[in-house]
Image: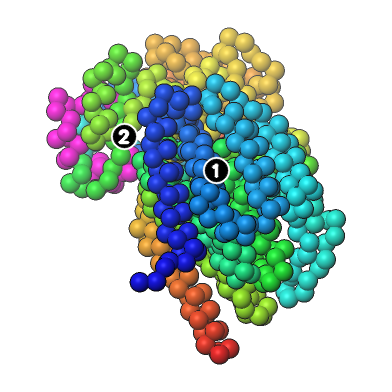
């Protein structure tokens, strides 16, 4: 029996150790009193229903450092294969992100989002400048463009972007960890192609650590990755991806590593576009709409799948499939000629378009071009003024909720005779007390005569007997018996205000049996 | 969102079953204001008859109208339609009585006096949920197939390419 080579020994020992250490360490942490400080409570932007500790990140980082030490101790000659600048940058990023993330994960403490973002930029900048981990060239359609110093800001943007994107997709059990594990596998394959075995080993350790964590993170999760874990894994992925593009025998271009992190980038890009379009539709100026792109919401891809009735595991499974597709494309694009690579990317774009279409991402964008936004200043002058006298809160809320822009409602008290009645086209009087119906009717008649407007009297007691004789002489007073069907009331208002049918805002017809208007 | 869009989205039919005329009126006014089609009746038997004709998506019933054993009553609705969603309109003092139903057939409670914004929000969520559930099966299958098939196609291309270059 021959001896086992050191690399095979490594493959047998280190990934297994990574899984085991991560699993048992997290198990220990979950049961320890420490996890009380890392509680994540349910909220309106969360999809979990109970308190879960965000302690996974701490376990992942600690396990990773422990396994690195074990690697150096057991296989020093293999450890020397790692590029020293990459190792230093990883350790630097680990320490910094662990500090920032842990503070943020402890529920008693909080770091301002802007401050956190600034710290991430600083960390990325230091990695790019001090450790010289930045893009030196960008390959597009087979052509390579030297970047020079411009590579530094692009790399900083890349690292910060991927770090935050990893944090953003951490919304469903085992989603972020799985997507990042797939990303590390892809980076490992790319590094293997380029002959950078040190990076391959690091990726294997990280995948092992993530698998160990995922045993606790599978739905229903016993622990979350937290900011510490997602930021850490995102930052390391971005560093390794940049490093892979700079290897001498690498076929990986910028497009390839973009595909490796394709799913997080897609989610963030779609979310930002949606927020921008929504802000524009809400009437914000373009600069303000750009500012609103960073606001958090719960309409990410994973949220949309959950709202469709899918479970956490189904959602994660589907999205892992998509992430794996991105990574498979990255590997293929790195190995095939530019033309074939472009075809693969084209196919991927069609797939993305289809996925986003099925998830209704384009609805708001299409509506932006379909609808003319309402300019209140000019349209208000052309609105039909309707005074609603003595209304209750329910009717008021219902009228306003119906959103017929043709009407300008003004709500007034029955005692006061406001000026707005003078130029209103229609007045609605609500009879709140059945015993006072005659008074309400007199009031309606007065309004109709005095202001020359139509009056709709809403009451409970209208029937043949209770309506006074004057009804027949006052054609301007219309009776409406409760319950009030708002679409029918609106139609009545349109009719009374003599708005041609072509000019009316359309809405669906109600069944005829509900029509209970007793015309005057 | 335009009115037309609102209607397209909230075409859902609701049934209000209540002996309390004021509550019935308020609910009808409010819900039609939100753009729903609303039917109303004042008795359980009338409600069941109306439901058999129209098969409403959501049924709102108040506590005094409920029978002593509501499970049987809710089951009788399911004979005509598989998935109606039941909401119970209850006052604060009736909450203890109603809470056990939440674990069974009832989806949510409508507070009396009506909390309008909350009611609108929860109904919108319900409607969204229902609309999405309708296409859930198809979507799930389609997405899973697409997600599973795509890597296979891509890898196939890769293998073909290697074979072609050999």
> In the figure, is residue A118 to the left or right of A104?
right
Residue A179 in view in this figure? no
Question: Does the magenta-highlighted stretch encompass residue A383?
Answer: no
Q: Eyeballing the image, is B75 above or below A207?
A: above
- Give me the residue at 83% from left, 62% from top: A147
Question: Does the magenta-highlighted stretch encompass residue B72?
Answer: yes
How packed mark 2 is, by other alpha carbons closer than 10 Å (few <14, some 14-19, many 20 or more), is some
Q: Secondary structure at mark 2?
A: strand
Name the chain letter of the residue that bears numbered label 2.
B
Rendering coords of residue B123 (x, y %): 42, 36
Rendering coords of residue A474 (x, y %): 52, 26
How packed mark 1 is, by other alpha carbons closer than 10 Å (few <14, some 14-19, many 20 or more), is some
In this orientation, which residue lies closer to the viewer: A375 or B88? B88
Q: Eyeballing the image, is A85 above or below A168?
A: below
Name the chain letter of the residue that bears numbered label 1.
A
Q: Eyeballing the image, is B89 above or below B74?
A: above
Q: Quadrant of the N terminus of chain A?
A: bottom left
> In the figure, is residue A101 to the left or right of A518?
right
The residue wearing badge 1 is A65
* Boundaries of the magenta span: B49-76
The dot on residue B107 is 2
Rendering coords of residue B82 (x, y %): 24, 48
């Amino acid at each position: 029996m021959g001896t086992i080579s050191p690399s095979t020994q490594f493959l047998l020992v280190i990934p297994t150790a990574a899984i085991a250490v991560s699993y048992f360490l997290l198990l220990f942490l979950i049961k320890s009193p420490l996890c009380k400080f890392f509680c994540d409570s349910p909220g309106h932007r969360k999809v979990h229903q109970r308190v879960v500790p965000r302690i996974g990140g701490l376990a992942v980082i600690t396990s990773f450092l422990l396994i690195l030490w074990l690697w150096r101790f057991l296989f020093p000659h293999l450890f020397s294969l790692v590029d020293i600048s990459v190792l230093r940058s990883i350790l630097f990023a680990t320490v910094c992100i662990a500090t920032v993330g842990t503070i943020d994960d402890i529920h008693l403490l909080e770091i301002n989002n802007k401050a956190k973002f600034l710290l991430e930029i600083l960390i990325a900048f230091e990695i790019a400048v001090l450790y010289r981990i930045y893009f030196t060239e960008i390959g597009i359609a087979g052509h390579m463009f030297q970047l020079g110093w411009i590579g530094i800001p692009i790399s900083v943007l890349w690292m910060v972007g991927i770090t935050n994107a990893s944090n953003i997709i951490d919304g469903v059990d085992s989603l972020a960890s799985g997507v990042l594990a797939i990303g590390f596998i892809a980076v490992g394959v790319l590094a293997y192609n380029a002959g950078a075995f040190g990076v391959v080993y690091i990726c294997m350790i990280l995948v092992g650590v993530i698998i160990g964590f995922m045993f606790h993170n599978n739905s229903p999760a016993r622990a979350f990755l937290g900011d510490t874990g997602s930021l850490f894994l995102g930052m390391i992925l971005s560093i390794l991806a940049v490093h892979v593009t700079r290897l001498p025998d690498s076929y990986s271009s910028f497009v390839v590593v973009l595909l490796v992190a394709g799913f997080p980038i897609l989610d963030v890009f779609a979310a930002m576009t949606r927020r921008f379009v929504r802000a524009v539709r809400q009437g914000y100026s373009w600069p303000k709409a750009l500012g609103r792109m960073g606001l958090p919401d719960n309409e990410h891809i994973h949220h949309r799948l959950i709202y469709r009735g899918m479970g956490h595991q189904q959602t994660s499974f589907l999205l892992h499939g998509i992430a794996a597709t991105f990574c498979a494309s990255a590997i293929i694009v790195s190995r095939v000629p530019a033309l074939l690579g472009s075809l693969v990317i084209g196919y991927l774009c069609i797939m993305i378009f289809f996925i986003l279409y099925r998830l209704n991402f384009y609805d708001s964008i299409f509506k932006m071009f379909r609808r003319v936004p309402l300019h209140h200043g000019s349209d208000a002058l052309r609105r039909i003024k309707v005074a609603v006298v003595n209304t209750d809160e329910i009717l008021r809320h219902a009228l306003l909720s119906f959103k017929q822009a043709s009407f300008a409602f003004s709500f007034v008290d029955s005692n006061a005779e406001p000026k707005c009645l003078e130029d209103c086209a229609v007045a609605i009087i609500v009879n709140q007390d059945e015993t006072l119906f005659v008074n309400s009717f007199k009031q309606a008649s007065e309004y109709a005569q005095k202001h020359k407007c139509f009056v709709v009297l809403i009451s409970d007691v209208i029937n043949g007997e209770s309506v006074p004789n004057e009804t027949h002489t006052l054609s301007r007073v219309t009776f409406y018996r409760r319950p009030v069907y708002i679409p029918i009331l609106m139609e009545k208002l349109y009719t009374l205000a003599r708005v041609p049918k072509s000019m009316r805002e359309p809405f669906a017809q109600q069944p005829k049996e509900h029509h209970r208007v007793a015309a005057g | 969102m335009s009115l037309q869009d609102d209607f397209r989205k909230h075409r859902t039919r609701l049934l209000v079953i209540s002996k309390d005329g004021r509550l019935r009126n308020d609910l009808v006014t409010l819900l039609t204001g939100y753009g729903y089609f609303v039917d109303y009746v004042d008795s359980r038997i009338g409600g069941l008859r109306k439901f058999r004709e129209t098969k409403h998506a959501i049924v709102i019933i108040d506590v005094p109208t409920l029978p002593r054993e509501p499970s049987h009553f809710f089951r009788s609705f399911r004979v005509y339609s598989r998935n109606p969603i039941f909401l119970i309109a209850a006052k604060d003092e009736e909450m203890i009585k109603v809470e056990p139903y939440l674990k069974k057939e009832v989806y949510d409670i409508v507070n009396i006096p009506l909390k309008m914004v909350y009611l609108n929000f929860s109904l919108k969520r319900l409607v969204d949920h229902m609309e999405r559930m309708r296409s859930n099966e198809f979507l799930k299958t389609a997405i899973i197939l697409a997600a599973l098939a795509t890597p296979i196609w891509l890898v196939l291309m890769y293998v073909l390419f290697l074979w072609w270059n050999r």
